[in-house]
Amino acid sequence: MTAFAVACLALACAWRAMLVLSDDRRIRRPAVYRPGLGWTDAHELAPRRRWARAGLTAAICLIAAAAAPAPWARGITILAVGILIAWILRDRILHPARYTSVCIAVLALAVALARFSPPAAGTAASFFAAQLYFVAGLRKLRSAQFMSGRVILDNAAYGTFQAVSGNHEFIRVPRLAELLSGSAFPAACRTAAILTAAVEPALGLGAIGLMPPPLLLGLAIPVHLGFLLISPYRIVPFTAAALGLLALTTLHPLIPLGR
């Protein structure tokens, strides 16, 4: 599971860095609106571009550590995690983010700890992963708008509008206007919202050890693949980091039942 977590961390790190570099290449005129970035121009993205190269360097180091002998692997992993944490701290100053950067940072620290003490890394990952899913699930349960399915429906409409306008970062829902005029699609969105709000706390319980590892990962993977439908281009770093964190929880969860 440690190797899987390292691979997830490298993917999240590299993908997030490539997003920054891609945004920098695309913005060539002032006052351009970018999802998740707001109104930005090329000058504002320049510092993020420079630090994104540090993220790519960290990803390369993580890949090299996976193939290196044990003593070298520890040193290279520590170096990669140090670079990654510095990049994330700087990037949060330039562009405050929510779950993604925090999740990547926690996974990075857990991966570094796993090189020295896998049980300690598993316990730390278990605590933070449980908190992540419990908070996300409770926030959804307390949101009447989300539980009604409106948030998912609005995201489908927004993604379709962006896709029709030529934005390849989103998936187009065919015949959305016809679907919205009926009752089946809103009902499906409501069902998806209820299932999501129920599954996330369940993943939190699995993260602390109240679920067999195969069931935990078997439930988490399709759920996160479903999240990718919102914006497959930009949610990959969070998906990879969350799955890597869940994988580490199986090393030694907070409540290791039957272990």
Image: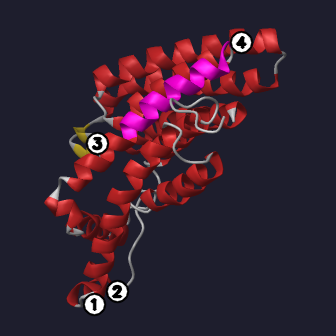
Q: Which of marks 3 and 1 is in front?
A: 1
> Residue 74 shows which numbered tag?
4
Q: Which of marks 1 and 4 is in front?
A: 4
Q: Indicate the position of residue 159 as horizontal and vertical percent values.
A: 33, 65
> Residue 178 shows which numbered tag?
1
Q: How crowded is mark 4: few (under 14 residues within 10 Å), some or many (20 or more)?
A: some
Give the mark nearer the N terminus: 1 vs 4: 4
Residue 242, relative to residue 156: is it above or below? above
**How far apart are labels 1 and 4 at the CA level?**
56 Å
Is any atom of residue 135 visible in this view? yes
Q: Indicate the position of residue 118 as horizontal and vertical percent values.
A: 66, 21
Label 4–label 2 contact, CB within 8 A: no
Residue found at x 26% / y 85%: 177
Q: Residues within 10 Å of mark 1 (few under 14, many from 20)?
A: few
Q: Indicate the position of residue 182 as horizontal and vertical percent values.
A: 24, 91
Which one is nearer the viewer's eye here, 203 or 85? 203
Give the mark nearer the N terminus: 3 vs 1: 3
**How far apart are labels 3 and 4 at the CA level?**
44 Å
Instruction: Check disc 1 and give the amino acid type.
Output: Glu
Residue found at x 84% / y 16%: 69
Q: Mark 3 points at which residue?
A: 29
Query: Magenta part of the protein: which range?
Result: 116-132
**How far apart are labels 4 and 2 at the CA level?**
53 Å
Count of numbered tags: 4
Is any atom of residue 104 visible in this view? no
> Residue 218 shows which numbered tag?
none
**How far apart are labels 3 and 2 at the CA level?**
34 Å
Label 3–label 2 contact, CB within 8 A: no
Identify the element where label 3 is drawn: loop
Which one is nearer the viewer's eye here, 121 or 112? 121
